[in-house]
Image (tube, helix red, strand yellow):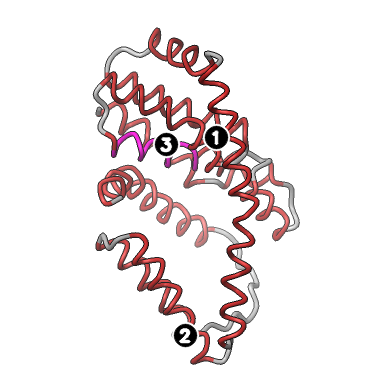
Amino acid sequence: MKDKFRANIQVALPAAVITLVVQLVYAFLSKEAAIGDLPFNILQAAPYFIVLALSLIGVNVFAVLLTGIVLFMIAGIATGSLTYATALSSMGGGISGMFETMIVTILVASIASLMRENGGFAAILDFIRRRASGRRGAMAGIAFLTAFMDIATANNTVAIVIAAPIAKDISTEYGVEPRVTASLLDTCSCIAQGIIPYGAQLLIAAGLAGVTSVSLIPFLFYPFLLAVSVAVYILKG
């Protein structure tokens, strides 16, 4: 996880910095927008920053998650927004919310096994082998494979589950480090998921803004810049 995080930073940080600059310039050049009164509580926000800091330091992911849960419970109870009962209820709700994803993941893993048994993976691998010319070609193959899987399934988790076994075979054959492969799987699935107008993220954003999801695409600075950053990362090898 630490190695993957470091690999991700090399790809994502330049895109994030450029996105921030673009958004600041765009905001200053645009008309003012009324956003209303949005109250916040520093104590309730603190756990988010603590979890982020622990992740950046490289603390074990399960320790970070458990720390976050405990800190949120303490902050919620201290500020009166949670009680012991509602905190446990919220955790139960979160687990229930993951049930659908778990079922889909199990079904997709089963479908992926059927694809492997019936030669689907071999066909995809052969297609990539015929077009890959060394390590860079293999990295590009993993990137496109993951992105296309996400376009087909509209779920980045499902796309990673399907693409991962093929990506592992490609990375082993062409000498692509596991951390780089994991980073490409993560990043490229998120790029596709963030751009497709029928993905959950854009549909939710469009619903909140009261516009169509397609109309938001020209303003997706970060996904497009991230795609450029991935391309540069692959070309550098």
Circle 1 Cα neighbour tier, 10 Å, few/some/many (<14 / 14–19 / ≥20): some
Residue at the image point whose x is 47% and y is 85% from the top: 75
User: Which residue is the site of mark 3?
Assistant: 185
Q: Main secondary structure of the magenta part?
A: helix
Where residue 134 sits, quadrant-wise, is top left
Q: Secondary structure at mark 1?
A: helix
Residue 187 magenta? yes
- The residue labelled by disc 1 is 109
Q: Which residue is mark 2?
A: 75
Residue 94 is left or right of residue 50, and the answer is right
Rendered-image quadrant of the C terminus? top left
**Where is residue 155 shown, x and y percent of the image?**
59, 41
Name the kind of residue labelled 3 in the image.
Answer: Leu
* Residue appearing at x 36%, y 38% in the figure: 182
In the rendered image, the vertical position of residue 15 relative to residue 205, given as above or below? above
The magenta stretch is 179-190
Disc marking residue 82: none
Q: CA distance from mark 2 to mark 3?
A: 35 Å
